[in-house]
Amino acid sequence: MLVPILWGLYLSFTNQSLTGAGGDLVGFDNYAEALADPDMWRSMLNTVWFTVLSTIPLVVISLALALLVNTGLPGQWLWRLSFFMPYLLASTVVSLIWVWLYNPQLGLFNAILGWFGIDPVTWLQDPDLAMLSVVVTTVWWTIGFNFLLYLAAIQNIPESQYEAASLDGAGRWRTLTSITIPQLGSTTIMVVILQLLASLKVFDQIYQMTGGGPAGTTRSAIQYIFESGFTGFRFGYSSAISYIFFVLIIIVSVIQFRITARRSA
């Protein structure tokens, strides 16, 4: 791991091309160009926007599903399997399924809208809906992992606490807000940290479903790095962007670590 990190850092200070040309040291020219590149900043903002849109439902809905299953629904193994199964699918399979669901002419979603007399929607071609459509796909695909983390944490809460609350006359809502939710604090922090880091590194489903379109509204930072290096052949420039993005992830990680440490203290 150390060799690619150091090699990539070195490349970021050169004009190395994928074709083998260049390789001369250019100092901080790549970083200066990247910081003044509106497309780079747009891809960063798209990534942050995706992270905000996806993290909240992936935390809230997964917690709700875990609480629902923990209530003792019949056939719990089936519920657990149903919620977790999509997480086992490859990103290519998930993307292909949802591209067909979003298809303007043949997709299931537009067919359902047609039953109510609503005109077809271009889910992945509309700049206002494309990112939201990818987020919905991502939530469906990855929510199972967070669901299992929450379910395991809920089942590890001592039963004696619930028995004591019942003797004190606490209802379900009071038990949920006073015992269950507070006991899940450390799990929630872990889920949020993992989800933030995963969302910031989004690439597969966006690249496969929209290609970064329409008009760059869904292009992520990782995709812009990929395109700069493998489409534009500018390895040095793409390396500089990747390290700018790396700093962003480090900042987010440090903030989360401080919050976690403070809560633990």
Image: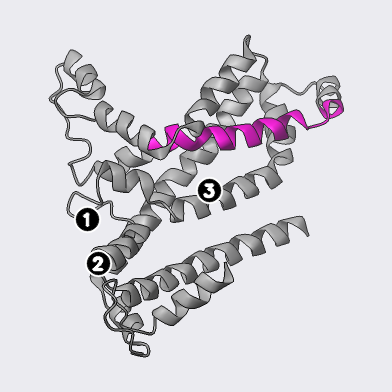
Amino acid residing under circle 3: Gln
The answer to whether residue 136 is visible is: no
For marks 3 and 2, give the CA distance: 25 Å
Amino acid residing under circle 1: Gly
Whole-percent x, y for residue 217 in the image: 24, 53
The answer to whether residue 217 is visible is: yes
Whole-percent x, y for residue 195 in the image: 53, 48
Work out which quarter of the rendered image holds the C terminus and state it.
Answer: bottom right
Which residue is tagged 1? 216
Magenta: main secondary structure equals helix
Q: Which one is earlier in the sequence, the residue at label 1 or at label 2?
A: 2
Amino acid residing under circle 2: Asp
Q: Which one is earlier in the sequence, the residue at label 1 or at label 3?
A: 3
The residue stretch that appears in magenta: 137-161
Which residue is tagged 2? 39
Q: What element carries label 1?
A: loop
Picture residue at 42% right of the left edge, 73% below the top: 244
> Marks 2 and 3: in contact by CB < 8 Å?
no
Work out which quarter of the rendered image holds the N terminus and state it.
Answer: bottom right
Q: What element carries label 3?
A: helix
Which residue is tagged 3? 195
Q: Quadrant of residue 224?
A: bottom left
Q: Is mark 2 on a helix, strand or loop?
A: helix
For marks 1 and 2, give the CA distance: 8 Å
